[in-house]
Image (tube, rainbow, N blue to C red):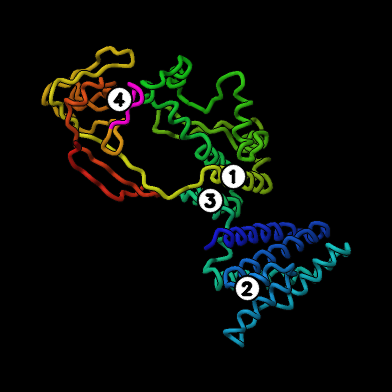
Amino acid sequence: MLPYIQFRLVLAKKMYKQALRLCATPTDSFSFSQGLIALHDSLDNFLGAIATKIGVPLQLMQRKNSLMQTFQEIETFEKATNPSFVLDNRSEISHLNTIRNDIKHQGIIPNINQALTLINPINLFFEKYCLRYFGLNWRTISLADLIKKEEICSKMKVVEKLIETHNYKEALNSMAIIKFKVFEESILRIELDNSYDLILPPSKEREERRKSENIFPKEEGYFSDFRERIKFLEIGIDLRYMNEFERLTAKVGFNNNKEWKYVLNHDRNWSSTNWTHDISIYCFDFLIDCILKNQEKYPLLKNKSVSNSYTFIAKEEIKIFDKNNILIYTISKDQTVEDSFLPGRIDRQWEIFDPHDLMISFSTETDTPDQSSTITGFLHKESLKDIELVLRKEYRDENGGLALIYEGNEA
């Protein structure tokens, strides 16, 4: 399905849900009137999506069409191949169109009891033609469908279901974790992974943080808040609203004594009083908006990730040094090292722009049975002539599935 059509369908569903909420209080004529306008806008987008999908001529779509004109153009287009074709619910949709125009252009208050009878047949119209033209169940269309990353999309749909079933507390906690996964988790993992220390030695503060039982994202430096605001404003997110989102949900970190177990730090206002439908919907819509803006900044291109590991064979004695050029390990002549990692080796060539590009990392057995220790250091450039490499290359598709394995000698 074309992204433009998908967006219109999702927008139609969002307006439809808004219409149902506003029309759910028939004693409030102002809210009910807004609900009918939202229902009309939902139908307008839905019919526009159908017209685009079936190929109504562009010159017709470019005209300033009313709802009923679009309705008629779809029916006329279908009759060209099926003369007996008729779109359902013309009278109800025409009635809604008249009421909407009276409200919007003349300020006439609708007869709520009469207008209520329109909602069920229009819902049936959505369900029937969503399945016919798009092969989709109208009830399951969600704003989350616009999220490109499958894991996040499915998690947001679970949240939507939690809200629909009134499990607001669980929904708010789940959204806090999703926000953490999208914006902070990968950065925090890198910050706390000691395998990067050789390149960027950690500060004493970071070393202390690694010893903490519970670790949360932390801004460092005097201008951190200013930089954070710029980072979010670049993609159209006001950090004040992000902070409000965290206040309504939670700040998320992880427990350092377990394997990345999420921990939630709630605001003092966290209580059943605020576990409500309105707050849940506000947070859901805000988080969806943030995720969509973030994914547009870095489009998810379909590409394969490549992982290289090497069997390292020393034809002569090879010395390995730390960042201060102090000897830390010696590989003996004719020794074979399995599963070594050589980040400076790209496409069967060395890309050496700096001495640190000659980094090597591998595991070696220790004196303690069933244990190993990781050696990470640097080679000297003159050692390259004294090594032989056997490459194992793995390709993974955009979903992480193993696509191809290659293994062979390198020159």
In the displayed structure, 3 sits above or below 114; it is: above
Please tell me which of labels 1 and 4 falls first in the chain: 1
Q: Give the residue drawn at x 84%, y 68%.
A: 111
Residue 346 appears left or right of 4:
left
Q: Amino acid at mark 3?
A: Ile
Of badges 4 and 2, the one in the foreground is 2
Q: Is residue 232 visible?
A: yes
Q: Which residue is mark 2?
A: 57
Describe the element under mark 1 as helix, strand or loop: helix
Identify the secondary structure beneath mark 2.
loop
Cα–Cα span, label 1 and label 2? 32 Å
**Residue 59 % position (x, y):** 67, 71
Q: Do residues under tags 2 and 3 come within 8 Å of each other at their CB atoms?
A: no
Segment tinted magenta in the rendering: 350-358
What is the spatial separation of the Cα atoms under label 4 and label 2, in whole angstroms? 61 Å
Residue under label 4, please give it: 359
Spatial CA span between label 1 and label 4: 37 Å
Tell me which numbered mark, 2 or 3, is placed earlier along the sequence: 2
Residue in front for this viewpoint, 93 or 268: 93
Circle 2: residue type:
Pro
Q: Residues within 10 Å of mark 1 (few under 14, many from 20)?
A: some
The answer to whether residue 374 is above or below residue 325 is: below
Which kind of residue does numbered mark 1 sit on? Answer: Lys
Residue located beneath label 1 in the image: 293
